[in-house]
Image (cartoon, helix red, strand yellow):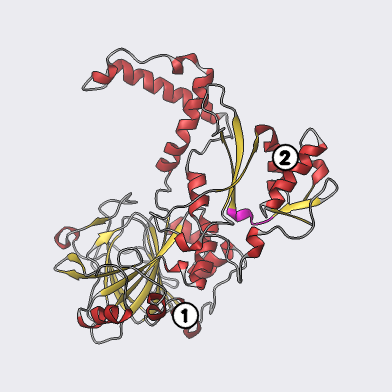
Amino acid sequence: MPKKAKPAGTGKEEGPGPCKQLKVEVAGGPSTLNFDSPSGLFESLISPIKTETFFKEFWEQKPLLIQRDDPALATYYQSLFKLLDLKSLCSRGMYYGRDINVCRCVNGKKKVLNKDGKVHFLQLRKDFDQKRATIQFHQPQRFKDELWRIQEKLECYFGSLVGSNVYITPAGSQGLPPHYDDVEVFILQLEGEKHWRLYHPTVPLAREYSVEAEDRIGRPAHEFTLKPGDLLYFPRGTIHQADTPPGLAHSTHVTISTYQNNSWGDFLLDTISGLVFDTAKEDLAFRAGIPRQLLLQVETTAVATRRLSAFLRKLADRLEGTSELLSADMKKDFVTNRLPPYCVGDGAELSTPGGQLPRLDSTVRLQFKDHIVLTVGPDQDRSDETQEKMVYIYHSLKNRRETHMMGNEETESHGLRFPLSHVDALKQIWNSSAISVKDLRLTTDEEKESLVLSLWTECLIQVV
């Protein structure tokens, strides 16, 4: 339902009807984004809507349109990516399919107009001008520093990967048919104007991308035009289509997306295996064999269903009494595939330890905390029954910006591992603004010094 900053009528939600507007008009809003902290960045991105209001009323629930009359912010948005940027980018070696798609919506279907191999700007511009094709540029944060800066902060804020695509569409054209996505979407209008139509979802909080036929989706629930400096948010599953109005300049917008495969269901799948593994070590019933020929049955037997239900209740009871959930993949996948911290220059502070070497009498503090995860898991070098747990620290300081969100590109994890006996000392470092090395909860001074030296070598702590 539409929300206005200053409702013109009663302020109550309207009943069903075509082409409703959802909007917050802003005059003289923020002229730049706030990069002081991840929360500050997000607050400035959705200003004047308050963060608490956004997550209470809009997040995963309904769209939000923020229309701004702010020339300074519009100029800043336009600096993020322009049509003319494609000329220099193509000279760096862009390829069809991997970096750029060229497409157009024809009779409700997506028509891909890609050539083979390397993208040449003159051919790209020809398809744009003559075939009225939309240019989709994948993951521009790999090359555009300010988008790297924005998305790195948003990954810290959401604790989830944040990707982006740029869409450049000529006047009187549409690139994609009506569809819905499996991600939360923030649209920033950069150049020109874009006419949007949003429809009620057929699959709320969808887990996959899908094209929807025009005759199935009915009339738009919301219809509006974005101009430079405007922002649009909508939840995954929201059916949408957008076109550039005829007679105007081309439109450029960037779609910033997050929360793909980041649901409670995904988290349950990620943690349940470790919970079952630990429980089976202690509970003989979990190690008992299933009935003979159970796997040959067409339908699960009532006996098997009852046993599984009982096991799930036992797991739930065990879960109630623990604070140590083992993440099998999600934590590691996130930190391995996310952006490295934004930096200017050669990034030496991310790869070369600096400052004083930590010793027993030093006071140390964690740095780049938003880029580190700590998790407990089985010793990956052993596969026997007595497999010991280890503490793993993964970080993104050495991640490659050039491969961010590119899917088929090889990525490697960076970090350290320690015996489980080190977990309390590591939590001390994590939970303190600064801590004396000699106060760490380890048995010997040698262990204390060795721990902080390992963290310092990875650029994860500094002496204060």
Does 312 appear above or below 160? above
> Residue 140's spot in the image, x, y percent?
42, 69
State which region is magenta: 367-371
Q: Considering only order in the chain, which callout, 1 or 2, is on the residue closer to the N terminus?
A: 1
Three-letter amino acid code at the position of disc 1: Ser
Instruction: State the residue position of label 2.
Output: 425
Query: How crowded is the residue under tag 2: few (<14 C-alpha within 10 Å), some, or many (20+)?
Result: some
At horizontal 51% and vertical 17% (from top left) the residue drawn is: 283
Relative to residue 106, is residue 138 drawn left or right? right
In three-dimensional space, the C-alpha distance between marks 2 and 1, rounded to whole angstroms, equals 45 Å
Q: Is residue 48 visible in the rendered structure shown here?
A: no
- The N terminus is located in which quarter? bottom left
Q: Where, by quadrant of the figure, is residue 92 drawn? A: bottom left
> Which of the pair 267/421 is nearer the observer?
421
- Tell me the SS state at disc 1: helix
Magenta stretch, main secondary structure class: helix
At horizontal 59% and vertical 57% (from top left) the residue drawn is: 397
Instruction: State the residue position of label 1.
Output: 79
At horizontal 75% and vertical 42% (from top left) the residue drawn is: 450
Check if residue 369 falls in the magenta segment.
yes
- Tell me the SS state at disc 2: helix
Three-letter amino acid code at the position of disc 2: Ala
